[in-house]
Each structure stands twice: as C-alpha cells, then as structure tokens.
Image (cartoon, rainbow, N blue to C red):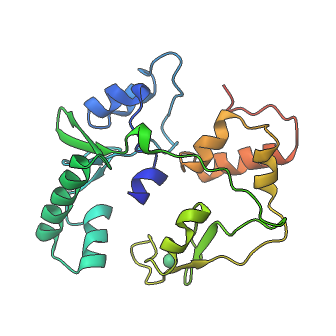
Amino acid sequence: MERVRLRGGIFHPFLDRYVATNGKRWEIWGGAMPIAPEFPKGISAPAFLAASQSDEFDPITGAQTWMVLWARKLLGVDPYAAETVLRDLLNELSATGIFEVRHSDKGPVWGLPQSRIEFVHVEPHDGVYPPTELRCTLCATAITHPPERFADWIGRPCMRLRCTGTFAAAPSKPTNYYRRLYSSGQIRRVVAAEHTGLLTQKEREHVEHGFKRAGLKLGMDR
Ligand SMILES: [Zn+2]
C-alpha cells in the first residue's frame, strides 16, 4: 500500500483511460485530457498494481517484479505462492474498500481510492514539531508519516528489496525549511507531484532549487 501511495497509484478521472489500457503512457502524455498534467517519457508515471505485465504498472506476477520479490523477502514464499498470496490479499483489501479494483483490457488493476487519501496538518506542541521522518538504519532511505502513524513505522523493513535494514526515527533537525515553506501558503501543484515521487531526480532538484530562490517561475507549474 505504501509503495502504491508513493508511486501515485491513486484513482483519478484524469487516469481513467490510462488505467483502462493497463498503463499505456500515451493516455497521460500526448493523449491526455487537455487540463490534465502530462507525463512524458523520463518522468515517473503513476503506478498501480496490475495482474499482468505492464509498461508502467507494478505487476504482481513474474519472478523478478518488485511485488513478488517483496512478498518473498517478507514471507519467505516461492514466486508462485507469492502471486497467489498477493492476489488474495488485494482482493481482500478491495472487498473492504482499502484498495479499489478496476478492470483494464489486460486484467485487474488495483489502486488507492481518492477517498482514502488524507492530508495532515502537523501542529507543534509547545513550539516543537513532533517527528514525522523515518530513515532506514542501513541505507538511510527516508519516508515521512504523520504523527498518528509514526510509531507504526518504527522497526518496519526497509522498502529497498536488497536492504535488510529497518526504519527508525530520523534525527530531529532544528528547523524544517519545507514545513515553513508549505505553511506559508505558497504551494504550487508541483509540490504534490514531488511528494508522490512522480519527478525524476533531475527535475526534483531543479524544482527544489527553484523553490529556494523565491519568486522563480517554475517550468513544471502549468
Ligand atoms: Zn534500507
């Protein structure tokens, strides 16, 4: 679920045709709806979970796919069992409304319903912000979670497949540039994209650099 969230696998009308074609990039690029953001090649595209192979989605089949390797890493099952387990789990989660299942021309596609996305405003207590950032103890991969969920993530396995580390609270920083920036109300659409990991590293660096130089017109802001 966290991987789908981070990769932007959230159902939205802009993505309906993209989902229906099992992740055909044209539907969110040249063939995108006129007011929808475009995802040309080189930019990470929203990734849903798919029952079959797909250019952009995360398939739950195939011995070398992230989903199957993740199930093997955590459960120690073989690839065939992993596929069965993943499918059963996704069907169960869809039946309870945690995931939503749709049907593409190549089979089922699972993603997060919009109604399950929550934006959390983090408030300071006595002038101190509660911790929201966790880092892997081995590779330092960082993830962010709201205070109510923070403790749930401590000790969980790192999401990098070959890393055996676990998440721990990141060392606290005296100030948080981004929190101040977001709180100031000068948020543009590109911030949401940056959070969902939809930008390439080069673009992200460009955007972050742009934010730090206040007033710069950003190329992505359209
Ligand atoms: Zn790690």
Q: Residue at the location (19% across, 42% down)?
A: 108
Specify whether 58 is left or right of 147.
Answer: left
Specify whether 205 is left or right of 36.
Answer: right
Specify whether 76 is left or right of 133.
Answer: left
The image shows residue 145, relative to residue 188, as above or below, that is below
User: Dividing the picture into quarters, in which one does residue 3 lie?
Assistant: bottom left
Counting from the top left corner in percent of width and height, residue 37 is at 54, 28
Q: Residue at the location (42% across, 31% down)?
A: 12
Q: Nearer the viewer, residue 99 or 69?
A: 99
* Most distant residue in the top direction: 34
The image shows residue 216, relative to residue 71, as above or below, that is above
Q: Residue at the location (26% across, 70% down)?
A: 71
Q: Dividing the image into 4 quarters, which one contains the C terminus?
A: top right
Asked if residue 82 can be seen in this view, the reply is yes
Q: How many labels does the image show?
A: 0
Asked if residue 144 can be seen in this view, the reply is no
Counting from the top left corner in percent of width and height, residue 123 is at 73, 57
* Most distant residue in the front direction: 126
Q: Which of 221 and 84 is in front in this view?
A: 84
Q: Nearer the viewer, residue 8 or 116?
A: 116
Counting from the top left corner in percent of width and height, residue 110 is at 28, 45
Specify whether 2 is left or right of 66.
Answer: right
Counting from the top left corner in percent of width and height, residue 80 is at 11, 67
Q: Dividing the image into 4 quarters, which one contains the N terminus?
A: bottom left
